[in-house]
């Protein structure tokens, strides 16, 4: 059986192999968060565009301030956005504000905290020596005009938005979000706003998968629920295959009414795997059907969540036009001993906190993969790897944060 790492690599390879180039759209900069850039962002001028003071203080000739105690004459003032055209003679300085352009003849800035007003008017005493370049960021030292500041395929976070804003890009060329169809299956499943019969359950997977898809950067297309009947399931799967990817929940186990694989096969699906060495989530299947990546995730809600995070997110990354992001595992100190018997990698509901400074993770007692309430009391999964099923309190262990929460 594939390890989850190998299953992820398979998903990445197969999805990338489709060589889909997403369509592009122009978006206002402020609406581009989380998208993938479809173009390069280039510096429109040198940055900083002038020799910039990083302090409020006095722009001086360093040669005048080789030692502490120099008394200089203040001959002007420069605010941020302003300029000083005059020349500085020996023994002269200019008061300057953070972000202002350093005058031509000055080559250091002494911060105001290191100065004191002199006895004479317009006189200031430097209480520290100044070396050339002190508190100045030279023009072009961050980037030169024409430099590529953001490469195509970059994921747009807030720093990337700042960079684009800085160079005047009010609109960006980005890739459209991939549309991910979400279809739950099961005769026992009714809509969230329906009243279930005594042995029926509401479709929580539809909405949780929708949320996970959006957190991953996709547009979720919620198709509702299909019954465990071949003909109807087939019709709804065919509808789902019109989107960029299809995620199904339920119907992939060994039960008599688990029909998802069979129906997909009938539609020409080629499966890359139909089990992964994880718990929860072992029966997860992945394949390509009509050129579309399809995930058949087990129906128990926590299995659905874990397998989506492990397997579907990297595919969404690629369909979004970017590279697959690594699984964002953290290290934390384990609060109590944990032992698992089954030779699988386990993802256990857990709570990580930083109350004592370091990350400490506590496993939560739960009722198995239907227990969403326990999961919701935590904020992460404790990962117990197949290679080491017995963990001792105090050990450093892997933690998979619940996306969007930590
Ligand atoms: P399955 O993988 O189809 O065997 O489903 C396993 C269990 O997961 C079912 O017995 C339900 O309790 C639960 N389940 C299946 N589908 C859903 C759903 N859409 N929403 C919430 N729970 C579900
Ligand atoms: Mg089912």
Image (cartoon, rainbow, N blue to C red):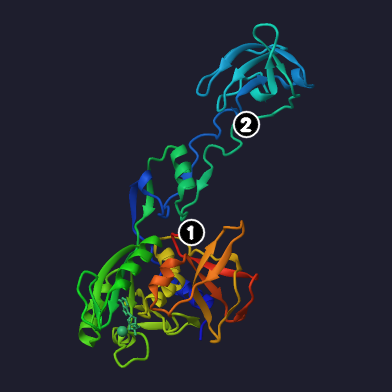
Q: Which numbered tag is attached to residue 74?
A: none
The x, y position of residue 215, in whole percent, is: 39, 61
Toward the viewer: 222 or 45? 222
- Residue sitting farthest toward the top: 120
Local packing at callout 1 (Cα closer than 10 Å; few below 14, some 14-19, many 20+) is few
The x, y position of residue 50, in whole percent, is: 57, 28
Assign a secondary structure to mark 2: loop
Toward the viewer: 388 or 230? 388
Toward the viewer: 11 or 359? 359
Location of mark 1 (residue): 406
Residue at image location 62% in from the left, 31% down from the top: 138
Indicate left or right for 227 with 170 as reference.
left
- In the rendered picture of this protein, how many numbered marks are placed on residues? 2
Assign a secondary structure to mark 1: loop
Mark 1 or mark 2, which has the lower sequence index? 2
- Location of residue 54 with respect to 329 vertically, above or below: above
Location of mark 2 (residue): 138
Q: Is residue 384 visible?
A: yes
- Residue sitting farthest toward the right: 67
Residue at image location 53% in from the left, 37% down from the top: 145
Separation of disc 1 and disc 2 at Cα? 38 Å
Residue at image location 75% in from the left, 17% down from the top: 64
The x, y position of residue 60, in whole percent, is: 68, 19
Local packing at callout 2 (Cα closer than 10 Å; few below 14, some 14-19, many 20+) is some
Please tell me whether mark 1 or mark 2 is closer to you in this view.
1
Quadrant location of ligand 1?
Answer: bottom left
- Location of residue 242 with respect to 28 vertically, above or below: below
- Location of residue 235 with respect to 160 vertically, above or below: below
The x, y position of residue 220, in whole percent, is: 31, 64
- Location of residue 76 with respect to 10 vertically, above or below: above
Q: Is residue 244 visible?
A: no
């Amino acid at each position: 059986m594939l390890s989850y790492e190998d299953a992820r690599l398979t998903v990445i390879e197969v999805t990338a192999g489709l060589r889909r180039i997403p369509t592009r759209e122009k978006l206002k900069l402020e609406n581009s968060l989380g998208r993938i850039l479809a173009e390069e962002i280039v510096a429109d001028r040198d940055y900083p565009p002038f020799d910039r003071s990083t302090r409020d203080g006095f722009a001086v000739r360093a040669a005048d301030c080789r030692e502490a105690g120099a008394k200089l004459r203040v001959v002007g003032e420069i605010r941020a956005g302003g300029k000083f055209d005059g020349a500085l003679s020996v023994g002269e300085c200019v008061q300057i504000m953070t972000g202002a352009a350093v005058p031509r003849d000055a080559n250091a800035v002494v911060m105001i905290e290191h100065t004191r007003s002199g006895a004479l008017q317009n006189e200031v005493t430097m209480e520290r020596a100044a070396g050339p370049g002190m508190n100045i960021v030279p023009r072009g030292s961050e980037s030169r005009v024409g430099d590529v500041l953001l490469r195509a395929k970059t994921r747009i976070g807030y720093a990337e938005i700042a960079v684009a804003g800085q160079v005047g890009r009010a609109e960006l060329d980005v890739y459209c979000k991939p549309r991910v169809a979400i279809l739950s299956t099961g005769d026992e499943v009714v809509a969230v706003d329906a009243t279930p019969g005594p042995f029926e359950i509401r479709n929580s997977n539809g909405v949780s998968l929708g949320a996970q898809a959006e957190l991953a950067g996709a547009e979720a297309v919620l198709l509702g629920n299909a019954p465990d009947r071949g003909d109807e399931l087939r019709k709804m799967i065919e509808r789902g295959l019109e989107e960029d990817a299809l995620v199904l929940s339920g119907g992939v186990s060994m039960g008599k009414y688990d029909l998802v694989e069979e129906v997909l096969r009938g539609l020409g699906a080629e499966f890359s795997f139909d089990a992964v060495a994880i718990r929860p989530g072992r029966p997860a299947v992945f394949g390509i059907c009509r050129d579309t990546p399809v995930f058949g995730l087990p129906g128990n809600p926590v299995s659905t969540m874990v397998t989506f995070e492990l397997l579907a997110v990297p595919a969404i990354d690629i369909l979004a036009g970017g590279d697959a992001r690594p699984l964002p595992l953290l290290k934390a100190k384990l609060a109590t001993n944990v032992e698992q018997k089954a030779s699988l990698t386990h993802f256990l509901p857990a709570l990580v906190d930083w109350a004592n400074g370091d990350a400490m993770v506590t496993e939560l007692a739960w009722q198995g993969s239907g227990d969403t309430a326990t999961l919701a009391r935590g904020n992460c999964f404790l990962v117990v790897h197949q290679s080491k099923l017995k963990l001792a309190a105090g050990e450093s262990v892997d933690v998979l944060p619940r996306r969007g929460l930590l």
